[in-house]
Image: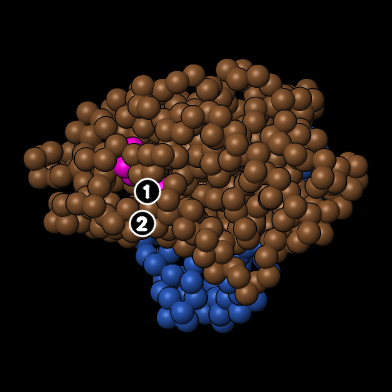
Chain colours: A blue, B brown
Amino acid sequence: MTISQLSVFVENKQGSMSRIAEVLAEANIDIRALTIADTTDFGILRLIVRNTEEAKKVLQENNIVVSINQVIGIEVPDKVGGLARVLRILDDALVNIEYMYDFLSIREEKAYIIIRVENNQKTVDLLQKNGIRCIGNEDIVF
Amino acid sequence: MAKYWQQDIETASRDQIAAWQNERLVKTVQHVYQNVPYYREQMKKKGVLPGDIRSIEDLKKLPFTYKSDLRDTYPYGLFAVPMEEVVCLHASSGTTGKQVVAGYTAHDLEIWGDICARQLVAVGADKSDRVHVSYGYGLFTGGFGLHRGAERLGATAIPVSSGNTARQLTILQDFGSTVLCCTPSYAMYIAESLEEQGVPLSKISLKAGIFGAEPWTEEMRKRLEEKLGIKAYDIYGLTEIMGPGVAYECEAQKGMHVNEDHFIVEVIDPDTGEVLPDDTEGEIVFSCITKEAFPLLRYRTRDIGVITRKPCSCGRTFARMSKPRGRTDDMLIIRGVNVFPSQIETVLIREGHSPNYQIVVDRVNNLDTLEVRVEVTAEIFSDTVTNLTASEKKLSESLKSLLGVHAKVTFCAPGSIERSTGKAVRVIDKRKI
């Protein structure tokens, strides 16, 4: 169970982000989560949207470089120590997290985080074995 | 102190120089016609036989030699002697990744030593001088050329080579270098490093600098002279003809004397190939008339300059050439290294990158910087910074290994490289030279 994530190349230049947001808005695409990684030269915008394939298509049509890849969505209790417990399990199993960000809440009392790891299947199995719920695109309420 | 290395030659009458050139040109044309099949073919195609070349007046009948001829005959196709007689090779970059290979006989190296010794004497050096050579040693002709000149003169050559500025500063002070040979931008870097470290001019013994292999201005000359407490001189050369020392500046600092006993210089209209009169700007063309191993005839340098035969106050009678004022092709000189945009394009395509790129050249702290901006493609793009910066680094390393200079790679968005009238602007040179 993984989530399709959209990654977009963003030039380190004024107006780059608003252009992307406008293209998505015009295509009526709802954004549910986002994060941006930046270097001195460029940024990588990562998005969870309602229709990933459709979003990819409209962005490409506007000459924007984009890719889709699978990330893991994890449900954690929205309370002190909730995240720490999940990370401890991953750490003990020597799973490296490339990057991580959070999500708008879907259900009350729950928080959702996205992680990007080397081996999705192994990590999802590990989490589920420890009673942690992983979500898919269909679990995301828009 | 002697003013000239070979006074009888350097101050010969114009008639005497013409007589040498007539005799040596005829001999060289016969030599290449007999020994270089490629030249024989080219001459036959133009309907010229060695017998048609009786004096320098006939030079214009000969075909030009282009950089592409060197590529087509790579590596040894234009050598005019058997390899048994070639004692040394040097090389510089060509337009398509293929190097230009120059061979030298023992006699060629003696001549090279002589012309570099002429340069050293012209800047006031003698046997007592310590010649600090910070040009790169290796296939690049810069290091070995001046080194051979210093040895020929009987001065003390210090083969420091390029780079490692801290060591350069130590050697300058401890070894008492008196003549510094390097690119002008590296000289400026050395001067500023000395200032930064608070080394006073009294701690160094430099009196002259021989700076070449890249374009520089009179303003830069003044600054280098002030900062280093020296006289700064220009030197001109290219691997295809010999290396440094093809032309050399004297005390007058008003243009570089072409060693006309070894090379004939012409200025031509780059579009028509027509020979232009003295004191007119055009493309500089050289013919080698004493070289044995690799004697190019009418080689198109692509450098734009002016030649004058007006007398010089130094007493030398050789023609003088101006600093090159530009190029007829797109060659860039970055930290003394020749770089062609086509070389960069070759690497990009080979490694699966977009052919939409832009080269940005700048000069930061007096050192040339090269940035290659490449439009990122979906194939190269990744959701992680690690992967994307690794791709930049990998490309940067490939460029470095082909070009011989460091290039910073920057990924940019598709369509972001400006296109003027449908054609991409490939090179942005921000250097003020």
Amino acid type of disc 2?
Answer: Arg
Tell me which chain the residue with mark 1 is part of: B
Give the residue drawn at x 68%, y 70%: B82
Q: Is the same chain shared between marks 2 and 1?
A: yes
Residue A136 magenta-highlighted: no
Count the labels in the image: 2
Residue at the spot of label 1: B117
Q: Residue B223 is drawn in which quadrant?
A: top left
Tell me how far mark 2 sits from mark 1, CA to CA: 6 Å
SS state under label 2: helix
- Give coordinates of residue A23: x percent, y percent: 72, 33
Report if residue B50 is visible in the image.
yes
Tell me which chain the residue with mark 2 is part of: B
Give the residue drawn at x 58%, y 40%: B20
* Mark 2 closeness class: few <14, some 14–19, many ≥20 residues within 10 Å: many
Report if residue B253 is visible in the image.
no
Give the residue drawn at x 56%, y 29%: B15
**CB atoms at circles 2 and 1 under 8 Å apart?**
yes
Quarter the C terminus of chain A occupies: top right
The stretch of residues the image draws in magenta is B116-123
Amino acid type of disc 1?
Answer: Ala
